[in-house]
Image: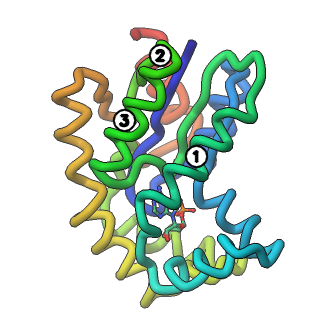
Amino acid sequence: MLNIVIFGAPGSGKGTQSERIVAKYGINHISTGDVLRAEIKNNTELGKVAKGYIDQGQLLPDNLIVDMLAAKLDSFEESKGVIFDGFPRTIAQAEALKQMLAARGQSVTVMLDLDVPEEELMERLIKRGQESGRADDNEETIKKRLVVYHSQTAPLIDWYKQEGQYAHIHGSGRLEDITAEICAAIDQK
Ligand code: AMP
């Protein structure tokens, strides 16, 4: 069972690289951001709550995200494993994931930290906003998301180092080279 956490600041390429990993390893993909955007589109109760946080560049409360993730995890049958994209984003979420997997006799195989210089993140996100029209990819909200990343999410780097699951990935350069570095890190585990 391959349980991969793909980690990195907004704009670090988690979604793009997840697609490539899914294609190669045949595992399931959970992007909490994508799930929330679908909830917003379908105008559900969760979607209404989520919109307020997402538009402000803030994280949703841990309990909401953890419940949503558990439901999604239980929906997979005969899974070879999962790539977690955009989750965990806080230490509390990482602890919840650890417990959730332990309850299933599993653990995180590797945490891939896509490391991209801050100026490049900003450029990529502004470009993505122009191309995809994602509401939170505007300069003001991007800045807030980066602050949230540094204060609430980046501490997970040390947390996963302590768990012995951390792998650093050079997240800028050619897509193929980044994918190759990721696959090497996965195959080493
Ligand atoms: P993403 O597509 O992963 O960049 O997520 C977009 C937005 O969804 C974030 O800025 C948060 O508002 C919310 N979100 C996604 N994943 C999480 C999470 N694990 N915990 C809290 N909020 C989240």
Q: Of callouts 2 and 3, which one flags the residue occurring earlier in the amino acid sequence?
A: 2
Amino acid on which disc 3 is placed: Ile
Residue at the farthest bottom position: 140
Q: Which residue is mark 3?
A: 169
The reply to whether the residue tagged 1 has its Cβ within 8 angstroms of ligand 1 is: yes
Q: Which residue is mark 2?
A: 106
Whether residue 7 sits left or right of residue 104 in the image: it is left
> Who's the residue at 65% across and 71% down the image?
46
Q: Quadrant of residue 107?
A: top left
Q: Of callouts 1 and 2, which one flags the residue occurring earlier in the amino acid sequence?
A: 1
Amino acid on which disc 1 is placed: Leu
Amino acid on which disc 2 is placed: Gln
Q: CA distance from mark 3 to mark 1?
A: 25 Å
> Who's the residue at 73% across and 67% down the image?
39
Q: Is residue 47 above or below residue 28?
A: below
> Who's the residue at 49% across and 35% down the image?
178
For discs 2 and 3, the disc positioned in front in the rendered view? 2
